Image (cartoon, rainbow, N blue to C red):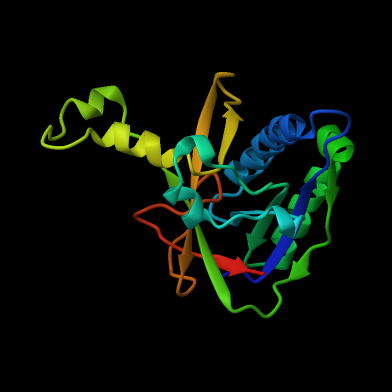
Amino acid sequence: MQANFYLDVIIQPTGDNTDLQLEHIRNQIFTILHGCFRQMPMQFALALASSKTDHVIGLQQQRDKPSSQRRFAVYDVLRVFAEQEQVLQQLLTTLQAHWKVRDYCQLGLVSKVPLHTAWKSYRRFRIPTLKTERNLSHDKAPLRDRRLEQAKAMPFLRVQSQSTGQQFTVIVDIQQAEDAGTGMPDGYGLARASQPFALPHF
């Protein structure tokens, strides 16, 4: 995935309980983005960012804390990357036509990725189902339990299926990376174990 251009979708909650509103609105906007990503497969990659740098907390520090003491960065920016500028312009036009985006987001301009020295990988973090867990080794703590504990330190997005209407959770594992890698994004704009890649961090 060559991330040459990007578009910032900034969530703007209003009124009281802004943290709860942010999470709720972000999930709805992500569902809209997911629909766009599915129509143009492997064209877009997603990063979670914050417009408030004082709220960003080291993810590794969070993993080292007990779950009761963890808190998260305020991820109020859904940053979408693409290789080609015109692809992001098409996405921008689609988003501008959606009332939820108009009412609850500020859309940036499609911009060229600036010079940067850091890379981050945004990978979907999977938790085994109970059915799968039965077939795994019992010599140590069940993988499902271990991953559920790990997931407490990770941001997540809730998506509503456009075909069934059911909601499900997409957990995002954010890791430092050495370079961009060669993988391609999935339908959520995220990396996979079989398709690893990283995005510019700036």
Q: Position of residue 136 (x, y in %)?
A: 16, 33
In this rendering, would 6 be left or right of 98?
A: left
Q: Is residue 63 left or right of residue 2?
A: left
Could you tell me which residue is drawn at 49 percent across and 55 percent down? 61
Percent position (x, y) of residue 187?
A: 52, 44
Residue at horizontal 53%, vertical 54%? 42
Residue in view at x 24 percent, y 28 percent: 132
Task: Look at the picture and state if 166 lies above or below 135.
Answer: above
Q: Quadrant of residue 200?
A: bottom right
Question: Foreground: 129 or 110?
Answer: 129
Of the 4 image quadrants, the one containing the C terminus is: bottom right
Using the image as rendered, state which of residue 185 and residue 38 is in the foreground: 185
Q: Residue at x 76, y 55 (%)?
A: 52
The image quarter containing residue 28 is top right
When the figure is inspected, residue 192 is found, relative to residue 71, above or below; the finding is below
Q: In the picture provided, is 114 more to the left or to the right than 186? A: right
Q: Is residue 163 visible?
A: yes
Measured as percent of width and height from the top left, residue 129 is found at 31, 27
Q: Is residue 20 above or below residue 87?
A: above
Can you give x and y, in whole percent of width and height, for residue 101 in the image? 82, 39
Q: How many marks?
A: 0
